[in-house]
Amino acid sequence: MIIKIHRGTREIGGSCVEIAHGKDRIVIDMGLPLIGDDGCGKADISKKIGTLPEIEGLYSSDESKKRVSALFVSHAHLDHYGLIHHADRRVPVFLGRATRELIEISCAMSGGSVAPDAWAPLDDRKPLEAGCFRVTPFLVDHSAMDAYAFLVEAGDRKVFYSGDFRAHGRKGRLMKGIIEDDIQDIDALILEGTNIASRRKAKSETDIEDELARFFKRKKDGIVLVSASSQNLDRLVSIYKAARKAGKTLVIDPYTAFVLDAMAKYGRFPDFSGAFGGLKVFFPTFITGKLVDLGCWPKIVNFSKFKITKEELTERRSGIVMMVKSSMKPNLRGLKALEGGSLVWSMWDGYLKEESSRRFLEFLGRQGMDLGAPAGLKVIHTSGHADLETLKSFAASLAPKTIIPIHTMNPEKYGETFNNAIMLKDGEEFEI
Ligand SMILES: [Zn+2]
Ligand SMILES: [Zn+2]
């Protein structure tokens, strides 16, 4: 079996792994390169599409070559799926059901495209055949829901690809479950190491919920705005629960409502069935217009039963926690509810340094918000990726013969952390 990491041996972003055995090949992830963030989420697609990975038989222009048997997508973050629309539409694509929906929602909103002809769903621990490969997906804990690691078997060889994972999220127990499965004789573990260079123990998602609740309770006067990803379902649950603990109403935009509504069939998330109190929707022009253009009018009608107006926001501001995005600026301008309000940044703090974030914060300041840290601007966040202790214990439990770094800015740390690490270069072949 030959492993070739096309991208990701020394960067976070653009993850793409080709595994070959005999004449058959599969590809795991075909991500968009990102530069310098904590792994997932934001990317300006127009600027960051790099050279496509050189994989024979993956593209429709490659008719003379034997086609790749399958493409597996670990989860719905751009650095793992962002280039899949370049693959030959006839190559079967395997991915989780919720993952597929999340990708379709993102693509619809951004005007991008995915849509290969052959999709098939992944189910936790249900092996799939692709060429001579047997591939078993394992559901993992990550900031994207429905994320998978993969066990790939062919001949008498076994590779385990960790994908992006952690053990401190709401599904942290999944990692223990994989260890208890006691997978024997793993030849190579391709292990993500976003946080391998940090000694800090990761806060759990429930720590985040508690921290948010304390902050929301402390803010007795003025609105609390929260900046967070609409697709980080763990975090949406934390924000909602924290708002309820503080006796406040959570106000979301229709895009976030759309995501929650779509995901409600996969888990217990605050939705619009009427079973969840303290949830309202504010309708900013841009996001609402976009959803209407996409034909989501029936959903908008349903969400409008939960509508909150600008006047109500102002009147009830001390009892409101509201999720915001910079695209909401035209509707936030001059909004009296913002005066004296504060902001929780519930994403990677590196995004705070980006020009667009800085401009958004300045804009909020001009609306009368108090954005002096730590009283008015607070970062409350935990990573979507495993901390060092988790990486160590997970690797020790799987006991692979070799550990190969991926999804890391610090591949050299693997050599210091594990005695069986082998650092590859992008595009280098490694035979097991
Ligand atoms: Zn990633
Ligand atoms: Zn990810």
Image: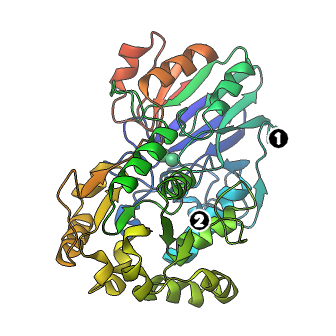
Quarter in which the N terminus is drawn: top right
Q: Earlier in the sequence, mark 2 or mark 1?
A: 2
374 or 104: which is nearer to us? 374
Mark 1 residue element: strand
Q: Taking the image as drawn, is residue 374 in sight?
A: yes
Q: Tell me: residue 290, above or below residue 12.
A: below
Q: Give the secondary structure at mark 2.
A: helix
Q: Position of residue 319 (x, y in %)?
A: 43, 68
Task: Give the x, y percent position of residue 122.
Answer: 76, 48
Against 354, residue 170 (above or below) is above
On residue 28, the disc is none
Relative to 135, is 312 above or below?
Answer: below
Tell me: 59 left or right of 131: left
The amino acid type found where label 2 is placed reads: His
Quarter the C terminus occupies: top right
Asked if residue 69 lies left or right of residue 318, the reply is: right
**How far apart, in angstroms, are the residues tagged by discs 2 and 1?**
22 Å
Write the residue at 50% across / 37% down. 5
Q: Nearer the viewer, residue 379 or 181?
A: 379
Residue 348 percent location from the top left of the image: 35, 49
Residue most extreme to the top: 419
Residue with the mark numbered 2: 85
Question: What residue is shown at x 35% (from left), y 22% (from top)?
Answer: 413
Q: Is residue 209 above or below residue 42?
A: above
**Identity of the amino acid at label 1?**
Glu
Residue position for label 1: 129
